[in-house]
Image (cartoon, rainbow, N blue to C red):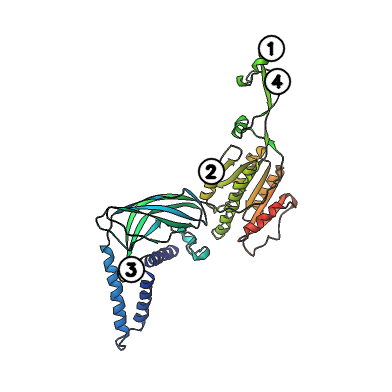
């Protein structure tokens, strides 16, 4: 009950803070501070304190009273990218269509971004640069030229995406300050739009992942998808069930019996990218870095003439494949953009998913957030399956590995520790085999 009350008070204070910073200009906020200072010192015995307070209050109230008289009929259309990257500033082209009979000057325009209230247990967490951890983006207002009667103008606004995931734009807003320049009046036009913010990516060195090429059961579909055919190795007698398209008709006509062409299936490198999504709320920042690391591999490994399977538990156990004509990396990035951390331990479920795909995998890259007994057991199961394994462990800044690192059977073939805040530097160690 107390936590809910604190949460309600926090959200109320947050709304008041946003309302004050959205409505009042810098001068208006200065007047509010001056009002607070004069009210604290104002008393009947002082000649200047009380009149100054009433004068400032009258100016603020007059500015606020003019706001309801600002009415303008307009609609907006926009051209926005469908996919962007977290941390990126991207432009949006906006056309404002004015339906009124009066021309307007001194207007500004702002994109209205939908904000998601934070969970109760995470409402006091803050992200980098003082931004609330839940804030997905920021869009400053821009000044507009003259908006003609029954006309339209074009402008370009910029949006900075802080976090991955769907960014919802609720609409557009025209703003106008009162003659004193203290208070802003708003007119809102609903115009929903969604931009998918992809995870950040880090540059990776040339990777030399271990493992031997294996036969992939995708067969001809895979070969055709990359412009290659299965290797022709000879002719043999027809067997029941052989496809007719493999019949070598010229040899059949010469010998008087059906002869088919025999092919050797293509063998390919196929790596598994395993993402650990189980973490506590305090580790969400490291989870975001783990997703960024996974996205970096998703963009790099399929370009090296191999397949990549992304295996994770996001609501349910999932496996996505990219590379060599089987799937687009974009689809994998869209899944990573939407994945959320799980508060319960799902390592056993993740291990079962990996073991079920062991027959086609040549190696595994495992991105972990901790090095505890359940995760060491996961690595041991992979080693029992004779699957070459590389572990990327993301630790908090200043943290170190626990003294109990497990038995020899629980140690991966390669162990790389990445420090939060220095992920890009740590990933370069993958380029040097040890």
Q: Position of residue 204 (x, y in %)?
A: 64, 52
The residue under label 4 is: 235
Looking at the image, residue 30 lies above or below residue 100: below
Q: Position of residue 235 (x, y in %)?
A: 70, 20
The residue depicted at 33 percent of the width and 63 percent of the height is 106
The residue under label 2 is: 331
Callout 1: few (<14), some (14-19), or many (20+) C-alpha neighbours within 10 Å? few
Asked if disc 3 and disc 2 are in contact, CB closer than 8 Å, the reply is no
The residue under label 1 is: 254
Q: Position of residue 387 (x, y in %)?
A: 70, 43
Is residue 286 rendered to the left or right of residue 70? right
Mark closer to the observer (1, 3)? 1
Looking at the image, residue 93 lies above or below residue 130: above
Comes first in the chain, label 4 or label 3? 3
Local secondary structure at mark 2 = helix
Identify the image quadrant of residue 418. bottom right
Identify the image quadrant of residue 328. top right
Distance, label 4 to label 2, CA atoms, is: 41 Å
Mark closer to the observer (1, 2)? 1
Comes first in the chain, label 1 or label 3? 3
Distance, label 4 to label 1, CA atoms, is: 13 Å
Is residue 86 rendered to the left or right of residue 45? right
- Farthest left residue in view: 101
Q: What's the mark number on residue 282?
A: none
Comes first in the chain, label 4 or label 2? 4
The residue depicted at 35 percent of the width and 66 percent of the height is 23
- Farthest top residue in view: 256
Local secondary structure at mark 4 = strand
Asked if disc 1 and disc 2 are in contact, CB closer than 8 Å, the reply is no
């Amino acid at each position: 009950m107390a936590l809910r009350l604190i949460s309600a008070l926090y959200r109320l204070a947050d709304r008041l803070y946003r309302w004050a910073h959205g409505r009042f200009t810098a001068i208006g906020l200065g007047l509010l501070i001056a009002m607070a200072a004069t009210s604290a010192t104002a008393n009947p015995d002082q000649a200047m304190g009380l009149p100054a307070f009433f004068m400032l209050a009258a100016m603020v109230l007059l500015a606020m009273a003019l706001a309801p008289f600002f009415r303008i009929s307009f609609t907006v259309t926009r051209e926005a990218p469908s996919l962007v990257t977290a941390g990126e500033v991207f432009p949006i082209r906006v056309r404002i269509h004015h339906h009124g009979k009066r021309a307007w000057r001194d207007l500004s325009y702002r994109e209205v971004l939908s904000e998601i209230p934070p969970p109760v247990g995470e409402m006091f967490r803050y992200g980098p640069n003082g931004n609330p951890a839940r804030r997905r983006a920021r869009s400053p207002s821009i000044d507009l030229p003259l908006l003609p009667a029954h006309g339209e103008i074009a402008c370009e606004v910029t949006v900075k995406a802080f976090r991955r995931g769907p960014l919802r734009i609720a609409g557009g807003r025209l703003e106008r300050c009162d003659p004193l320049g203290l208070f802003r009046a708003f007119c809102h036009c609903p115009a929903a739009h969604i931009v998918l913010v992809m995870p950040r990516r880090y540059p990776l060195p040339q990777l030399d992942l271990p493992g031997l090429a294996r036969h992939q059961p995708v067969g001809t579909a895979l070969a055709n998808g990359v412009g290659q055919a299965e290797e022709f190795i000879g002719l043999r007698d027809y067997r029941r069930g052989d496809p007719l398209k493999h019949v070598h008709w010229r040899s059949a006509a010469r010998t008087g019996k059906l002869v088919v062409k025999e092919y050797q299936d293509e063998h390919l490198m196929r790596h598994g990218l395993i993402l650990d999504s189980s973490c506590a709320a305090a580790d969400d920042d490291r989870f975001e870095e783990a997703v960024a690391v996974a996205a970096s591999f998703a963009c790099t490994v399929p370009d090296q003439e191999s397949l990549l399977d992304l295996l994770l538990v996001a609501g349910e156990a999932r496996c996505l494949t990219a590379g060599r004509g089987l799937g687009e990396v974009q689809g994998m990035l869209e899944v990573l953009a939407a994945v959320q951390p799980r508060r319960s331990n799902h390592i056993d479920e993740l291990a079962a998913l990996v073991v079920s795909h062991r027959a086609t995998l040549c190696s595994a890259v495992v991105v972990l957030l901790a090095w505890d007994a359940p995760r060491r057991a996961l690595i041991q199961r992979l080693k029992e399956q004779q699957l070459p394994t590389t572990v990327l462990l993301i630790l908090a800044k200043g943290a170190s590995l626990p003294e109990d690192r497990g038995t020899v059977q629980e140690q991966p073939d390669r162990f790389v520790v990445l420090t939060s805040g220095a992920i890009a530097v740590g990933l370069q160690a993958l380029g040097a085999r040890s």
